[in-house]
Amino acid sequence: MIDLHAHVVLPEVLAGLDEDVVHLDQGEPGVRPPSFRVGDYTLEGVDYRGTAFTDVGLRLAAMEAAGVTFQVLSPNPLTYLTDLDPTRALGVARSHNDRVAELVATAPDRLGGLAQLPTQDPASAASELHRSVTELGLLGAAISTDPGPALDDPALDDLWATTVELDVPLFLHPVPDGVARPVRDPRLARFDGDLWLGFAYEEALAVSTIVLGGVLDRHPGLDLCVSHGGGATSWIAERLEHAVATRPWADPALRADGAVARRLALLWWDAHVGGPRALAALVATVGDSRLVGGTNLAGWDEEVDPTHGDRALAATLDANARRLLRLDRTGRHRG
């Protein structure tokens, strides 16, 4: 299986940041759990050190056990750092991407990489994407569903255009509430809802913004893959179409029959959605021609087989992933 949803944590890169920005705490048994704090958000009960997130040997072993033949390493969403000063954010991104390229070089037939970008400065993000692809050999980039400028803000057009010019994909993944925003919704915080309910909202909002904001109309060659099947997208797609047909703000071009569905068909979808019923709803809504496999290997919601035993679908997902990642063009993962 080709796995597009796999995050990496690089302590050697994070060590250069102040503790008020990022802090990894191993915890103390019986006193406090391990935690990973970024800004005002703390993820408790997770110690990334000594796991597949930080140790490439453990990652390759976990991939072997899970039947993952090729995995694409992307930055951990907690460390997108979209609220950091743009100059510092660029420095972190460059260090991160250099290190990911080094990790990929240790097992180039098993690993690929997606770049981190300082999207709060779109010009720098476009430049770093170009460097990461042309000089480091990374396969694309991963960015937040809330990257600084709104996803349909013309400020991001240079980044979208550079992505199309380089002919690489971008992976969109949300950030937990409270990381980049100064106020965390206490209703989500109670049950770690940031990680499951909040993500579903953010992903569906990202899809809606891209479709309604004309991003795909301005950049028809853009390949965007949305994590977790676009969150709540499969449940709200019909309501989205109804809103476009009835609300006064809608672009007339979107009012034509099938206009929303045609734009949704231009996106790519991560199959890591949590279960067979959610997967069936996603396939019923967007089909399987742009569905790709994802596991979040070693994460709290790891899903080793996102197809839930459907071998035919697994073959489709791998073929789709090869197209999205341009693996035949790069010569990577020929198996």
Image (cartoon, rainbow, N blue to C red):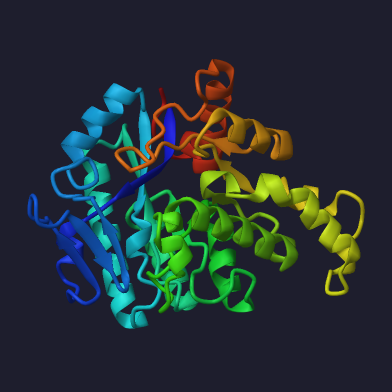
Q: Is residue 326 visible?
A: yes
Q: Is residue 289 visible?
A: no
Q: Quadrant of the C terminus?
A: top left
Q: Image check: 188 left or right of 57?
A: right
165, 284: nearer the viewer: 284
What residue sits 84% from the left and 69% below the top?
A: 250
Q: Image check: 184 left or right of 298?
A: right
Q: How many marks?
A: 0
Residue 132 spot, x, y in % from top left: 37, 59
Q: Image check: 5 left or right of 213?
A: left
Q: Quadrant of the N terminus?
A: top left
Q: Image check: 137 left or right of 106?
A: right
What residue sits 68% from the left and 60% below the top?
A: 208
117, 240: nearer the viewer: 240
Residue 277: quadrant of the picture: top right
What residue sits 68% from the left and 44% below the top?
A: 234
What residue sits 50% from the left and 58% below the top?
A: 198
120, 187: nearer the viewer: 187
Residue 179 spot, x, y in % from top left: 37, 69
Residue 69 spot, x, y in % from top left: 36, 27
Residue 233 spot, x, y in % from top left: 66, 50
- Is 73 placed above or below 99 here? above
